[in-house]
Image (cartoon, rainbow, N blue to C red):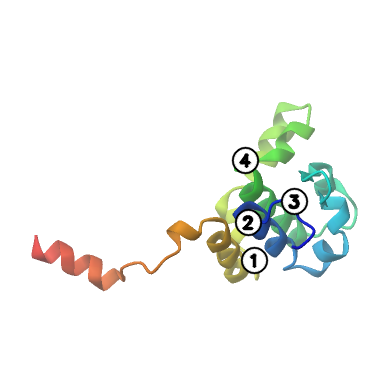
Amino acid sequence: MEQARPQDCYHKALIYILGICEDTRRHFGQIYDIKSGCIKPECLRQGWQTSGSVRVVRLAFSLYTDGTPGVDDYKSKDDQIDECRGYSVSDIFCCGYAMYFLEGIKLRYPEYSKKQKTFEEILQNYREV
């Protein structure tokens, strides 16, 4: 984190998420250029990727860029659509890393991660109306 250019919520989330998985930690330099601050979407097609590491990278990229950066790497519309679908909530979160992903989201959106009302408190407000 000390090497990241600005130490903002974007970089905190990116670096935390990429640190979740051993494969993404090992290949960090193939995923993100810390000097330029640029992600490397082409890493999504490298042979070392697993179904879990692809999920980690896609979430990290999405939190960092607020987009689906891997989509532009494909010329075929069908391949672009398939890549875009890979960024869906169900495609990313249906894995053992989900609880860690939530922590990464809290790092990226700290202003929305403060104590929220419980479901019971919300229901109580409706009953009072």
- Establish if 72 lies above or below 52: above
Cα distance between the residues tagged 3 and 2? 27 Å
Which label sits in the foreground, 2 or 4?
A: 4
Kindly identify the residue that appears in the image at 78 percent across and 26 percent down.
75
Characterize the local packing of mark 3: few (<14), some (14-19) or many (20 or more) Cα atoms within 10 angstroms: few
- Amino acid type indicated by mark 2: Ile
Earlier in the chain: of badge 3 and badge 2, it is 3
Characterize the local packing of mark 1: few (<14), some (14-19) or many (20 or more) Cα atoms within 10 angstroms: some
- Amino acid type indicated by mark 1: Cys
Q: Nearer the viewer, residue 37 or 80?
A: 37
Cα distance between the residues tagged 2 and 4? 14 Å
Q: Secondary structure at mark 1?
A: loop
Cα distance between the residues tagged 1 and 3? 31 Å
The quarter of the picture where residue 56 lies is: bottom right
Disc number placed over residue 95 in the picture, else none? 1
Kindly identify the residue that appears in the image at 68 percent across and 62 percent down.
17
Disc number placed over residue 5 in the picture, else none? 3
Which label sits in the foreground, 3 or 2?
A: 3
Q: Mark 2 = which residue?
A: 92
Earlier in the chain: of badge 4 and badge 3, it is 3
Cα distance between the residues tagged 4 and 3? 20 Å
Earlier in the chain: of badge 2 and badge 4, it is 4
- Amino acid type indicated by mark 3: Arg
Q: Secondary structure at mark 2?
A: helix
Q: Mark 4 = which residue?
A: 67
Q: Is residue 28 left or right of residue 122?
A: right
The quarter of the picture where residue 105 lies is: bottom right
Q: Position of residue 33 (x, y in %)?
A: 83, 48
